[in-house]
Structures are given as structure tokens and as C-alpha cells.
Image: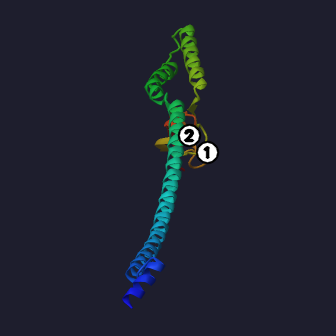
Amino acid sequence: MAKKNNAQKRKNGTNHSDLEKEAKELDLDQSDSVVDVDEEQDDTSDLTSNISNLEDKLLRSQAEIDNINKRHIKDLEKAHKFGVENLLIELLPVIDNLEHALNNFTEESKKEDKEGIELVLKSFESTLDKFNISPINPLHEDFDPLMHEAVGTQTDSSLEDNKVLEVLQRGWELYDRVVRPARVIVVKN
């Protein structure tokens, strides 16, 4: 009988132990392929999440670069616009001295001297005007603490309260920024 089984095995070309080995190998291959599919799915989801994270970082970086560029442009505009502010602050005493000299001319002074100083002052003011620097001269206007510095009060029944009665020193503004407020006396009845 053993000869018969061996002959049959030879006829089939395999024996039972060989079949068991093949079956085990097939089971292993199938379980490996299931594991491989799960690993591939995990790898794909990891890659997808990495791609979305990188895209998000790229968008954020681009937005940050845009914001930096906008800030840089604004800073440059401010530098060009208000770059002469320090120069103006240094020149204001010169203007004040010219105005003071005009106010203190006596009757014996030469008319030509006074006219010369007036021309110099007008020329100076027209040059400042070219750079959008303008005087604040609020005579008989409402007192504005942002543009005026009250150095005193005085009663005057012909004007309403909080009106500027006298300008002691003109103020100056660069564009719409007050560089120096006007020093004034305000009406308080």
C-alpha cells in the first residue's frame, strides 16, 4: 500500500507534506499582502497629511512675505514723507527769531531792513510749503488741544469761551502731523 501511495504521489508529482508547505507559504503570502496593503494605506495617508501640512506652511509663508512687503512699503513712505521732520524742528527757532525781529522793529529802524527780513521770512515759508510744511495760526478759532498749547487764559466779552485770543508762537504741521503746537492764550469768561 505504501508503494501504491508513493506511486500515486509520484503520479501527482507531490506528496502531502509538500502540499502543507505550499499551503503555509500561500497563507504567509496572503497575510503579507494584507499587511502590505495596510502599510501602503498608512503610508499614503501619512504622505497626504504631510503634503497638506506643507501646503499650509507654504501659504502661511507667502502671506507673511506679503505682509512684510506691505509693511516695508509703508515704512518707506513714512520715511519719505516725514524724513524732514527733524530738519523742520531744527529750523523752527530760526523762523521764530525772524518773526521776533519783525515784531521788535522800532520807528527809527530802516524800512529796507524790515522789508528784507519780511522777504527772507516769506521765502523761507514758501520753501517749507513745497515740502508740505504749513504754519498753524489759529487766531479767533476754537481751541484744539491737539494743535494748540494754551499757555494762559484771558477774559474777553467780544469772543466766546475757548476761542484763541492771541497767538504767542505759531505752530507747525508736516502733512497732517503736528510737529509743534501753536502757543496761544484762550478766552475764559
Question: What amino acid is labelled 1 in the image?
Answer: Leu
Give the residue displayed 48% in from the left and 30% down from the top. Answer: 85
Q: How many labels does the image show?
A: 2
Of residues 25 and 119, the one nearer the viewer is 25
Give the residue displayed 56% in from the left and 41% down from the top. Answer: 164
Of residues 55 and 60, the one nearer the viewer is 55
State left or right for residue 2 relative to residue 187: left
Please tell me how crowded label 2 is: few (under 14), some (14-19), or many (20+) other residues with Cα within 10 Å.
Answer: many
When asked about the image quadrant of residue 129, the answer is top right
Q: Name the residue under label 2.
A: 165
Q: Name the residue under label 1.
A: 159
Q: Are marks 2 and 1 in contact (CB under 8 Å)?
A: yes
Q: Which mark is residue 90?
A: none
Look at the picture and state if 40 lies above or below 106. below
Q: Horizontal and vertical percent for residue 184?
A: 50, 38
Which element type, helix, strand or loop, lies under badge 1? loop
Residue 146 can be seen in this image = no
Please tell me how crowded label 1 is: few (under 14), some (14-19), or many (20+) other residues with Cα within 10 Å.
Answer: some
Give the residue displayed 46% in from the left and 23% down from the top. Answer: 91
Q: Which of marks 2 and 1 is nearer the N terminus?
A: 1
Of residues 137 and 13, the one nearer the viewer is 13
